[in-house]
Image: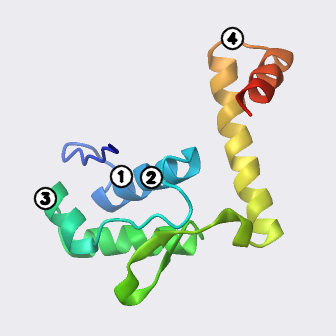
Amino acid sequence: MITISIDNTSPVPPFEQLRGQVAEIIRSGRFQPGARLPTVRQLAGDLGIAPNTVARAYKALEVEKLVQARGRHGTRVVDSSDLPKTRRADLLAEAAKRYVSEARRLGADIDEALEAARRAT
């Protein structure tokens, strides 16, 4: 079960909270390529926000090439193998930066971080 929540007390706009959470879920692999996201109306109702807020977040995810809107077939997670090489390289660099940042926060050196990444595959 994947949980998405909106903090109404946060200074971060709801659409950005939603975009960021869904992007992280996709990048972490918890939404598999081809997975269908909830409809705009369904997610808006579940989160208690306006449908236009969800639509704006989905549009931003589409611009990032993380999802693709397919009309009546819904919004689906893009298969990263279909991405242009430059976009895939950009996304990989972003993921590497997040990983290195977390490894440093944990006090790991580069060799420990690389070994952990090798073991994870």
Q: Amino acid at mark 1?
A: Gln
Q: Residue at x 81, y 67 (%)?
A: 86
Q: Are marks 1 and 3 in contact (CB under 8 Å)?
A: no
User: Circle 3: is it few (<14), some (14-19), or many (20+) Cα within 10 Å?
Assistant: few
Residue at image mark 3 = 48
Q: What numbered label is drawn on residue 20? A: 2
| Colour mapping | rainbow
Q: Nearer the viewer, residue 78 or 89?
A: 78
Residue at image mark 1 = 17
Q: Residue at x 82, y 25 (%)?
A: 114
Q: Amino acid at mark 2?
A: Gly
Pick whichever of labels 3 and 2 is earlier in the sequence.
2
Q: Are marks 1 and 2 in contact (CB under 8 Å)?
A: yes
User: Circle 1: is it few (<14), some (14-19), or many (20+) Cα within 10 Å?
Assistant: some
**Residue extending farthest right:** 111
Q: Amino acid at mark 4?
A: Gly
Numbered disc 2: secondary structure: helix
Q: Cα distance, mark 3 to mark 2?
A: 17 Å
Residue at image mark 4 = 107
Numbered disc 3: secondary structure: loop
User: Circle 4: is it few (<14), some (14-19), or many (20+) Cα within 10 Å?
Assistant: few
8 shown above or below 108: below
Q: Is residue 39 left or right of residue 106?
A: left
Residue 46 found in image quarter: bottom left
Q: Residue at x 80, y 58 (%)?
A: 89
Q: Is residue 66 left or right of residue 49?
A: right
Residue 53 found in image quarter: bottom left
Q: Cα distance, mark 1 to mark 4?
A: 28 Å
**Residue extending farthest top:** 107
Q: Residue at x 35, y 88 (%)?
A: 72
| Camera-nearest label, 1 or 3 | 3
Q: Position of residue 93 (x, y in %)?
A: 76, 49
